[in-house]
């Protein structure tokens, strides 16, 4: 049987700049090529490999896609395989990354020209339909994380490898769960481990809490601002509110507007396209500053970016409502250390337009994570029963790998960046 070599260029023992180089039978394929955004610092990038034939892009998030234009810049005009909607999402995210970098005076090493070439090189593939790159046979399976998120199953000379990308084993309002039951026998598993050390609270409870917060805020005459990621998260929140019987007006602002339009266009990529349609019909897009100013003054429900309060229209709404104790700001996920979202939770203030701003609004934090929790990851491993497990994409991936090895007796490890493993 032929050898499969895996080199980790980034995204192990950390979250960010996911990049793995896989080589088998002379074919070299990158599994994702992301960038790491660090609050108040320059972003980080994986090294440029010497030779690559193609990229398999698991999903659009910048920690998986953000360095692709750097590859193009180095002369790698190579095909990038992914699910159709991923191309439209990276169109949005990569151009936005350039904008943000300019604003923060960071050098990300590419411009719109390189992004255009990435988009031109994108080759859409379909879930469950095998395709070939050199001697590798590859099949994408739905990963359940965001629309278009794929797990790549790679077969070479009688051996098989599964790269999960980011995945979720539970169904959400927006996404069906990862298609684990459809995956054939796996020899080598490369799994993400973002929440390998913890469980999420039951989603049902989070949804009820969200509805309560919104209803109470409106009753007391306040504005309910909900912050979340542009791709998937705010739509998930809107769908949850609808499912819980909320029928009031919902405003949507920031990059989430365009992302919602894309999702609507590719509605075959979500769990329930009718539910999506009914939800988007109940959403009003904030189209301009005039509208933004008007709705901020009244008791309204506003879903907006950015998810960790690092920028975006959420800053405007917080500035407007900062002294109003009846208004609320609700965070919908984990807040990374050093972000303004984390500062709001710990210190009650954020930096808006260069100014320290105390926030009197009530602050809430909910968990609408789109990643598998510890039990989800373990369930997947139990179902697939791989020979070896490589743990990546997690702050504690080495601890989790040790645990897997001890408890399950499966050869498990979390490589260091730069390490090459031969299977
Ligand atoms: Zn992701
Ligand atoms: Zn990720």
Image (tube, rainbow, N blue to C red):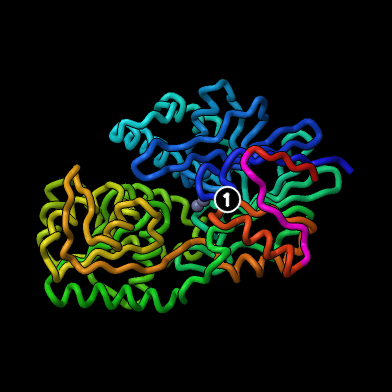
**What are the residue bounds of the magenta stretch?**
409-417
> In the image, is residue 188 above or below residue 329?
above
The answer to whether any part of residue 350 appears in the image is: yes
Label 1 Cα neighbours within 10 Å, binned few <14 / some 14-19 / many ≥20: many
- Quadrant placement of the C terminus: top right
Residue 179 or residue 399, whichever sits in front: 399
Q: Position of residue 201 (x, y in %)?
A: 46, 74
Residue 80 located left or right of residue 281 = right
Residue 284 located left or right of residue 370 = left
Question: Going by the picture, which residue comes out furthest to the top?
Answer: 75
Q: Which residue is mark 1?
A: 13
Residue at x-position 20% and y-position 48%: 352
Residue at x-position 85% and y-position 43%: 157
> In the image, is residue 94 above or below residue 309?
above
Residue 285 or residue 12, whichever sits in front: 12
Q: Position of residue 379 (x, y in %)?
A: 66, 70
Disc 1, SS: loop
Residue 14 located left or right of residue 248 = right
Residue at x-position 25% and y-position 67%: 363
């Amino acid at each position: 049987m032929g050898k499969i070599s895996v080199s980790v260029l980034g995204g192990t023992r950390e979250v960010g700049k996911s990049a793995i180089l896989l080589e088998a039978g002379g074919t070299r394929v990158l599994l994702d090529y992301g960038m790491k955004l660090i609050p108040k610092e320059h972003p980080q990038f994986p090294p440029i490999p010497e030779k690559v034939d193609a990229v398999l892009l698991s999903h659009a998030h910048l920690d998986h896609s953000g360095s692709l234009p750097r590859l193009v810049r180095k002369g790698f005009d190579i095909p990038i395989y992914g699910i159709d909607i991923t191309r439209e999402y990276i169109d949005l995210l990569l151009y936005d990354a350039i904008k943000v970098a300019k604003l923060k005076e960071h050098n990300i090493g590419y411009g719109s020209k390189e992004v255009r070439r990435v988009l031109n090189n994108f080759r859409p593939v379909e879930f469950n339909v095998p395709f070939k790159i050199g001697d590798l046979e590859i099949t994408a399976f739905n990963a359940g994380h965001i629309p278009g998120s794929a797990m790549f199953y790679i077969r070479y000379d009688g051996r098989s490898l599964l790269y999960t990308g980011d995945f979720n084993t539970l169904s959400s309002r927006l996404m069906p769960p990862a298609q684990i039951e459809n995956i054939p026998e796996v020899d080598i598993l490369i799994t993400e481990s973002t929440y390998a050390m913890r469980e999420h609270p039951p989603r049902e409870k989070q949804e009820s809490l969200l509805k309560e917060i919104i209803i109470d805020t409106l009753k007391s005459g306040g504005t309910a601002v909900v912050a979340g990621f542009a791709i998937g998260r705010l739509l998930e929140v809107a769908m949850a509110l609808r499912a819980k019987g909320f029928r009031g007006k919902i405003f949507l602002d920031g990059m989430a507007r365009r992302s919602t339009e894309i999702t609507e266009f590719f509605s075959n990529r979500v769990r329930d396209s009718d539910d999506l349609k009914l939800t988007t019909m109940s959403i009003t897009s904030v189209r301009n500053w005039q509208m933004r100013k008007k709705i901020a003054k009244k008791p309204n429900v506003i879903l907006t970016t950015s998810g960790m309060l690092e920028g975006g229209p959420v800053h405007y709404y917080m500035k407007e409502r900062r002294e109003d104790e009846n208004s609320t700001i609700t965070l919908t996920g984990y807040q990374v250390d050093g972000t303004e979202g984390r500062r709001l939770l710990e210190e009650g203030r954020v930096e808006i337009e260069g100014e320290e701003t105390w926030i009197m609004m009530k602050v809430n934090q909910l968990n609408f994570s789109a990643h598998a929790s510890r039990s989800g990851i373990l369930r997947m491993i139990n179902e697939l029963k791989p020979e070896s497990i490589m743990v990546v994409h997690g702050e504690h991936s080495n601890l989790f790998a040790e645990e897997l090895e001890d408890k399950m007796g499966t050869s498990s490890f979390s490589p260091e960046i730069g390490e090459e493993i031969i299977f």
